Image (cartoon, rainbow, N blue to C red):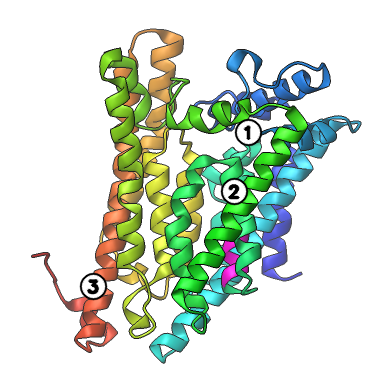
Amino acid sequence: MGKLIQVFVIGGLIRFLLPTFIPSVTTTLSSTVELSTPITSFKSLLEAIYFLNHDIDLYDGGVNHHPPLVVIIASCIKAIPFSLIWFDLVYTITDLLIAWKIVKLNQWYNESRSKIKGSQVTGFNDDLIACFYLFNPLIILTNLSHSTVVFTWYFIIESLIQIVLKRNIMRSMISFAAATYLSFNSLYIFPSLVGLALRTFPTTTHIKLLVTSSTGYLVSLLLLALASFAFTSSWSFLDNCYLAVIYFKKITPNVGLWWYLFTEMFEFFTPFYLGMFNLYSFSFILPIAIRLFESRATPDQGDSFLAVLLSLLWVSFTKSYPTVGDLGFALSLLPIFKGTILPYCKMIYVSSMTLVTALILSPIFYYCWIVLGNGNANFFYSINLIWGGVHILILMDLLWAKLIVDYGVENDICKEELKGLNLAQI
């Protein structure tokens, strides 16, 4: 048995056997604010299934924020005997598929960068790339909590696969529309995804590709919305699934930066800051996509795939209902850049230690606040700020490393000399 198969077998068994033989694991983790939000909660999904089976409005009481098609598919699984075991299997298979597609993305990236640079780009082995996802504690915990964000990750990865490997822009946009249907914040990755498509299809004009991708994406979203309306005979899911995210209608503690500010803020200022926070969430997406766009004239001075990763990091940092799994997903893609960007990163140790510190203290401070009552919201929010700082450190490190690489390309500096240079921002 090869190493890659062993990694998949062990990773799959962890995800399947733990919740199957110890069901309380899923129950406990699905109630943890670091892993579950009102938008992705497995508990609210089960309640929505109950509503569906008893002919109650899916969004009665404001508990459910899952799209109708997700509830309908989940109800079909729930109707099968030993349904919880089937849920465990579905989540396990989804994670294994994501890991396999990340391995394929790693192979493609190394091959494509080798052609651009004219020299061999060596990354991690396939088994290590799979390990970075399957044995990532943040990913494992998110999967065991049965958060529906796992399916969003799958469709995002599938969209990337359809662009770079299958070279089918329509299927990519259909997959990305499904990701947006599951999670509104996936929309923010669209510019970087289109930038990657423009680089992948060099024989297609930019205008034609933009029109094709935008049309396929919007039509797919419209069809999903119409199907949801056909099943529920109501457009209320738009308000409960998407506007609830934009307007931050359910203020609950999470690892993000929104909840505390809107808890303490005077209601008079809420509309202004809602607009500012939503604008801020999108404001850096276009600059990232444009700066890292690989033009056909100078493909060695951009990296549209890196733009996708940075967009994922930015979404994890600025979204209104984040989980630790969002950062874990982005970090699982980071080892793909082992042969290009990572050697020039300067703050890996600092970022890692800050990440570990935030992960250790977050549940402790939340326990002190909610259970013991000898703390307050400031305890937990202070760790949220550190958690946000982790995102900023990683973003800054990756961007600066890319600028160093571009400087070496522009000035024809070899890799060994470039590592020894001490560049400064001006």
Residue 131 at x, y percent in the picture: 58, 59
Real-space Cα distance between discs 3 and 2? Answer: 33 Å
Magenta segment includes 160: yes
Above or below, 132 relative to 372: below
Query: Which mark identifies residue 404?
Result: 3
Of residues 374 and 30, which is closer to you in this image? Answer: 30
Query: Which mark identifies residue 145?
Result: 1
Of residues 379 and 405, which is closer to you in this image? Answer: 405
Real-space Cα distance between discs 3 and 1? Answer: 40 Å
- Residue farthest to the top, as pictured: 373
Above or below, 44 relative to 369: below
User: Residue flagged by tag 1: what amino acid is it?
Assistant: Ser
Residue at image location 58% in from the left, 31% down from the top: 238
Real-space Cα distance between discs 2 and 1? Answer: 19 Å
Mark 2 burial class by Cα count in 10 Å: few <14, some 14-19, many 20+: many
Q: Can you identify the residue that label 2 sits on?
A: 179
Q: Main secondary structure of the magenta part?
A: helix
Q: Which residues are magenta?
A: 154-163
Mark 3 burial class by Cα count in 10 Å: few <14, some 14-19, many 20+: many
User: Residue flagged by tag 2: what amino acid is it?
Assistant: Ala
SS for callout 2: helix
Dots 3 and 1: beta carbons under 8 Å? Answer: no
Dot placed on the residue nearer the N-terminal end, 3 or 1: 1
User: Residue flagged by tag 3: what amino acid is it?
Assistant: Ile
